[in-house]
Image: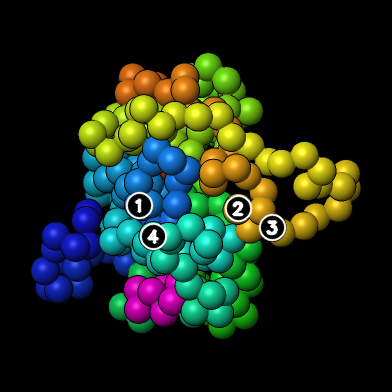
C-alpha cells in the first residue's frame, strides 16, 4: 500500500499489524556528478519496489527528505535539519502512525548522516511507548554488502558517497541527471583519521569535491541489479516483521 495514493477511509480500513515503512533520506550535495536529491530518489525507489513485492504487508510512507546533513552544509543545495529538529520530525511522523493504531514501524534509511539520530529515535520510542505492544525497527535501504559486492566492480571500496553504487542506481532511475562528463574518483584527505579514534568532519574538510569512492565503473545495468537486490532484502525484512509476535 502507498499511503500518499490512498484516501483516509482506505488507510483506516487497513489491518493494524501491517508494516509501516518509513523511508528517511536527505537533500545534500553528491559530488560533481549526482543531483542533491540522490539519497531520497534511491530511498523512494527501493520503497516502491518493496511495495511491488509485498503490497499486502507494507504501508509505504512518503520519503522524509529532510535529513541530518550538516557535514555537507558548505556545499550549495544541501538542505539540512539540525539534530534536534531531525529527531523531533521523525518522532512526530511515528507518533502520527502510532496514533492511528499501527503496531509495526520500520525505518528505512538511505543517508548515512541520519544513522546517529535513528539510534536515538529508537531509544526515545522505547522510552515513550515501552508499555505498549508496538514494534520499532530500522534498517539500511540497501542490501547487505556481500550481495552488493557480487554486483559492484569495486566492492565496498568503490561506493562511499556518490561512488559506484549510488551513481549506478541513479543511472538506472534517471540517467539524464548524471553528469557523466564529471565522473571523478575522490576520497578522504591524507591524515584525517587516527586508528581506533572516532571523529566528525565536514565533507569539504575531508574530500576534494564532496565524493568518497569511485563512480567511473557505474552502469545502469548494475544500478538495476543493486536496486532489485536492495528491494528484495527490505521486502524480506517486511515479511519477517509482519510475522513476528514479540508480545504474544
For mark 4, does the 10 Å Cα neighbourhood hold few (<14), some (14 to 19), or many (20 or more) residues? some
Lower sequence index among marks 1 and 2: 1
Please report contact status of discs 3 and 2: CB closer than 8 Å, yes or no.
yes
Dot 3: within a 10 Å radius of its alpha carbon, few (fewer than 14), some, or many (20 or more) residues? few
The earlier-in-sequence mark between 3 and 4 is 4
For discs 1 and 2, the disc positioned in front in the rendered view: 2
Q: CA distance from mark 3 to mark 1?
A: 22 Å
Please tell me whether mark 3 or mark 1 is closer to you in this view: 3
Instruction: In the rendered structure, find residue 201 and report the number of the disc placed on it.
Output: 3
Q: Nearer the viewer, residue 201 or 90?
A: 201
Which image quarter holds the N terminus?
bottom left
Q: Which residue is mark 2?
A: 203
Q: Which residues are magenta?
A: 89-98
Name the residue carrying label 1: 37
User: Is 96 one of the magenta-colored residues?
Assistant: yes
Task: Name the residue rendered at 33%, 34% in the picture.
Answer: 179
Amino acid at each position: 500500500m502507498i499511503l500518499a495514493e490512498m484516501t483516509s477511509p482506505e488507510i483506516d480500513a487497513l489491518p493494524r499489524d501491517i508494516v509501516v515503512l518509513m523511508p528517511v533520506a536527505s537533500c545534500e550535495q553528491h559530488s560533481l556528478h549526482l543531483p542533491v536529491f540522490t539519497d531520497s530518489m534511491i530511498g523512494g525507489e527501493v520503497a516502491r519496489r518493496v511495495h511491488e513485492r509485498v503490497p499486502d504487508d507494507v504501508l509505504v510512507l512518503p520519503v522524509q527528505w529532510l535529513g541530518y546533513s550538516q557535514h555537507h552544509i558548505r556545499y550549495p543545495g544541501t538542505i539540512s535539519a539540525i539534530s534536534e529538529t531531525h529527531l523531533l520530525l521523525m518522532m512526530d511522523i511515528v507518533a502520527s502512525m502510532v496514533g492511528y493504531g499501527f503496531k509495526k514501524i520500520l525505518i528505512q534509511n538511505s543517508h548515512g548522516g541520519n544513522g546517529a539520530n535513528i539510534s536515538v529515535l529508537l531509544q526515545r520510542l522505547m522510552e515513550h511507548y515501552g508499555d505498549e505492544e508496538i514494534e520499532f525497527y530500522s534498517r539500511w535501504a540497501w542490501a547487505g554488502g556481500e550481495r552488493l559486492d557480487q554486483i559492484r566492480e569495486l566492492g565496498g571500496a568503490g561506493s562511499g558517497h556518490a561512488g559506484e553504487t549510488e551513481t549506478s542506481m541513479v543511472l538506472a532511475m534517471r540517467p539524464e541527471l548524471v553528469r557523466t562528463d564529471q565522473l571523478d574518483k575522490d576520497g578522504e584527505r591524507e591524515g584525517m583519521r587516527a586508528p581506533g579514534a572516532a571523529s566528525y568532519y565536514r565533507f569539504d574538510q575531508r574530500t576534494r569535491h564532496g565524493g568518497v569512492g569511485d563512480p567511473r565503473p557505474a552502469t545502469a545495468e548494475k544500478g538495476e541489479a543493486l536496486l532489485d537486490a536492495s528491494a528484495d532484502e527490505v521486502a524480506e525484512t517486511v515479511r519477517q516483521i509482519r510475522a513476528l509476535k514479540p508480545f504474544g
